[in-house]
Amino acid sequence: MSSRVKVVVTGAAGQIAYSLIPRLLDGKTFGNKIVDLVMVEIPQVVSKLEGVLMELEDSSFPNMGSVEYTDNFTDAAKDADWFLLVGSIPRGIVYEGKKIEERSDLLRINGGIFVNQGEAIGKYGKKDAKILVVGNPANTNALIGQNASGVKSQLWMAMTMLDCNRAKSVISKKVQCSIEEVKRMIIWGNHSPTMYPDIENAIVNNSSVGSLVNDMEWVDKTFLPTVQQRGKAVIDARGASSATSAAKAALDTIIACENPTGDGDCFSAAVASDGAYGVPEGLICGYPLMTMPDKSVEIIKDVTLSDFAKERFDISIAELESEREAVKDLL
């Protein structure tokens, strides 16, 4: 008899979730586990999930267990193994009569949402639950949620895999290799334009990408801005933020956590700092991670950073500290 996994997805009527949800049930993301799914939305749009439910039923996914939808996150959280927190208030919308433009407003509005969700996850979720925050500002949303949960055995992560995948794509074109050949692609810091995609420690066929490229001007003037500003470029091109690629990155993160990391490799996500690499303790920071055979996730602590990398990583750390200061009354 196959084991089961309960997965909760917020923002379930949105574009990211529409790409994400079917692939949770296809037998690849969770292997042979039966997936019991709960989709969560705000009351104003929760009825749209009836159509999503119909499509899932009509798809005959081999690993689909029970599927429910609700606008009550607390009910959804009970005994869940995985939480994919996709829903958040985006910049530019009108919220309670005010157009949200400033990052400080974004932090505070979403902070209230993640306090409530964190409390519910801590109280009702599995004590070894894994939580992936996709909704931006992801790192600080995760910080707020983790603090509110009060359960240290739960793993809170902010998604940086999208940045990682973007960086791999640029590298593969530059050195003319397949994306699968790019390994150890580390994203340091915040999931924002300050994050640092570490090309010097990435490898292709056991060779350093930094040495293969051997052009720091290209790294500084082309590679970094291309990866760091890719989200804005997508919005400018299609009139909406990344959806398919964000969903794929969430799935990649789940798979990385569900399977032991290969020798010499790592995966990228942001987790609570324990002081590694000089990051203030408690900040949710992008790190190189590895999944152990028991499915615990650990920070890899033997990566060497060049002065070039440290300088850029420090910029992102400073941004994370400023975000924490902006929401300190929620912590």
Image: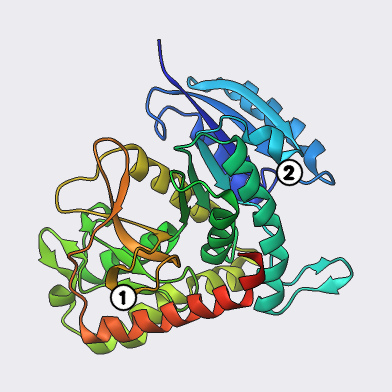
Residue 39 vertical position relative to residue 5 in the rendered view, above or below: below
**What colouring method underlies this structural image?**
rainbow
Q: Which residue is mark 1?
A: 278
The amino acid type, in three-letter code, at marker 2 is Glu
Where disc 1 sits, the SS reads: helix
Q: Position of residue 311 (x, y in %)?
A: 32, 86
Q: Position of residue 259 (x, y in %)?
A: 30, 38
Residue farthest right in this picture: 97
Tell me the quarter of the picture where residue 272 sits.
bottom left
**Disc 1 residue crowd, few under 14, some 14–19, many 20+, Cα 10 Å:** few
Residue farthest top in this picture: 1
Tell me the quarter of the picture where residue 161 sits.
bottom left
Residue 318 vertical position relative to residue 181 in the rendered view, above or below: below
Name the one closer to the observer, 271 or 22: 271
Q: Could you tell whether 118 is left or right of 201 in the image?
A: right
Q: Quadrant of the N terminus?
A: top left
Disc number at residue 159? none
The amino acid type, in three-letter code, at marker 1 is Gly
Residue 331 vertical position relative to residue 278 in the rendered view, above or below: above
- Closer mark to the observer between disc 1 and disc 2: 1
- Cα separation, mark 1 vs mark 2, equals 38 Å
Disc number at residue 41? 2
Name the one closer to the observer, 68 or 81: 81
Q: Earlier in the sequence, mark 1 or mark 2?
A: 2
**Disc 2 residue crowd, few under 14, some 14–19, many 20+, Cα 10 Å:** many
Q: Could you tell whether 37 is left or right of 90 in the image?
A: left
Please report the residue visible at 29 percent of the width from the left and 52 percent of the height from the top. Answer: 298
Name the one closer to the observer, 186 or 115: 115
Q: Position of residue 207 (x, y in %)?
A: 10, 65
Q: Could you tell whether 17 is left or right of 315 in the image?
A: right
Where disc 2 sits, the SS reads: loop
Tell me the quarter of the picture where residue 173 sits.
bottom left
